[in-house]
Structure formats: C-alpha cells, structure tokens
Amino acid sequence: NKSLDFGREAILEKYVYGSKSLFEPGSGYHYSNTNYELLTMIMDQVYPKGHASFYTFRILSRLGLEKTYYKEETRYNDLYNRGMANGYIAQSKEGTLVNATDLSLSIASGLTGSDGVLSNVLDLYTFFKSIIDGDIVDRESVAPLRSIEFGKFGKAIGLSGQHPGYTTELWYLLDQQTYIVCQMNVGESLLALAESKPNYQVVEKILATVMD
C-alpha cells in the first residue's frame, strides 16, 4: 500500500510517543528500529554534518566499503537506476511471488538508521568481520548477537535481517572460525515479518555444500 506513511514522525507517533520502556536504561538489551530513529535524531543534532555523513566517513570509508550505499547518498539512487536486483515476496500460501522492490524502497525511505542501506556480499563480510574483531565497536558490544547451533558445524553468533523482498544472513562459526554471508532477493511479507525466523535451514544447506 503506497499510501501508507512511512515517515519518521508518523512512525514515532504510532510506536514511540507515550509508550513505556521495556526496561530501565542499562539493564537489558532489545533490538528496536524506532530506537535507531531516536539515535539518528540525536546524531543530527550533535554531529555537524548529520548522521549520514557520520556513517559514510566513520564506517563506509574507514572500512573501504566501496559497494555499500546509504539512502541519503546520490549513489544509492544511481544503483537502483542501474538495475539493482528486484526483491520478491510470496503473495499466497501457494508461493506465488510478486515484485516488492518499490515497497521495500518506500519503507526504507522513511526509516532512518535502521534501514536504507544497499550492499553486496563482500562488503557485508568486511563489515561483519570488523564487528567480530572489535575494530569498529568494542567486544562487549558483540555480546547481544544471536547465538545458535548449526548442527555438526557447532555454535555460531550473528544476525539475520529481513525486509519485504530481501533477506540477509550473517554468521560466524566459532569452532571453524568461518564466516557465512548470504543474501537473497526473496523476503517475507509485511504481515509475516512479525513472526519470521532466521533462515537457518538455508544456511545449513550452504554449510553442507561448502564445508562437507
């Protein structure tokens, strides 16, 4: 529904203003898109060139991520116009796929801090490795990463991101000291996202193919 308002103020008005916090500051951890909205609002006030410039110079340029683009950069729109991979969602239980690229970009246009980044596998590997190695954040910040067991491949830490039309999996196998980076141009529908789970089976199949 392209008539939906995905702007910052609409999101904060609906999900943040007047809501109680889940816990006292410093006493717990819970991922929240809306908290990134608040964080970027603070960054725009205290960082002279704004949060987008901060991302570019402190993360993208520092790590040499030449194929990663944030939505407020000119290159972001240029990439879309040059033929970025379309993303698809299942429209029905039968698995009929529909193109969700415009919907995905529409949502990304309103979300700030938690959305609006385009990248490729190699840049994602570089970024994720820098997190695991403690290069751009301290090692204590790695603690909230999800921890799971990938069968015979052992324990892994990482994260899974889903968006209408797109899915990304980033995992680090502790015993093998191996990184798994997976991008797919198929993602969950908006209604399914709330109950979605990481694509563990997909990752396990990749591991079995590459490492067996």
Image: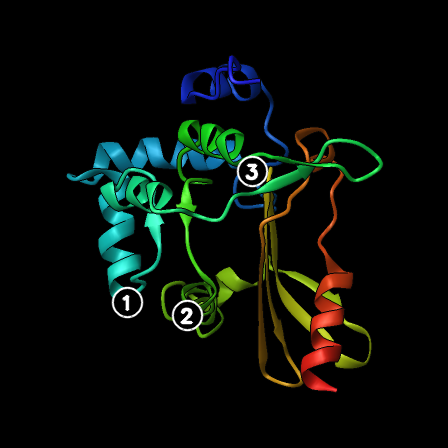
Q: How many marks?
A: 3
Disc nearer the start of the sequence (1/2): 1
Q: Position of residue 111 (x, y in %)?
A: 44, 31
Is 67 positioned to the left or the right of 175 in the image? Answer: left
Per the image, the residue denoted by label 3 is: 32
- State the mark number for residue 126: 2
Q: Position of residue 192 (x, y in %)?
A: 73, 34
Q: Could you tell me the amino acid type at mark 1?
A: Gly
Task: Give the structural element (helix, strand or loop) at label 1.
Answer: loop
Is 29 positioned to the left or the right of 90 in the image? Answer: left
Q: Give me the C-alpha separation between circle 1 and circle 3.
A: 28 Å
- State the mark number for residue 117: none
In the picture, which quadrant includes the N terminus?
top right
The image shows residue 35, relative to residue 159, as above or below, that is above
| Snapshot quadrant of residue 138 | bottom left
Residue at horizontal 49%, vertical 49%?
A: 85
In terms of depth relative to the viewer, which is nearer, 191 or 18? 191
Q: Position of residue 197 (x, y in %)?
A: 74, 48
Task: Give the structural element (helix, strand or loop) at label 2.
Answer: helix
Disc nearer the start of the sequence (1/3): 3
Q: Give me the C-alpha separation between circle 2 and circle 3.
A: 24 Å
Q: Could you tell me the amino acid type at mark 2?
A: Thr
Residue reaching furthest to the left: 48
Q: Could you tell me the amino acid type at mark 3?
A: Ser
Q: Residues within 10 Å of mark 3 (few under 14, many from 20)?
A: few
Task: Give the structural element (helix, strand or loop) at label 3.
Answer: loop
Per the image, the residue denoted by label 1 is: 64
Q: Are marks 1 and 3 in contact (CB under 8 Å)?
A: no
Mark nearest the camera among 1 and 3 is: 1
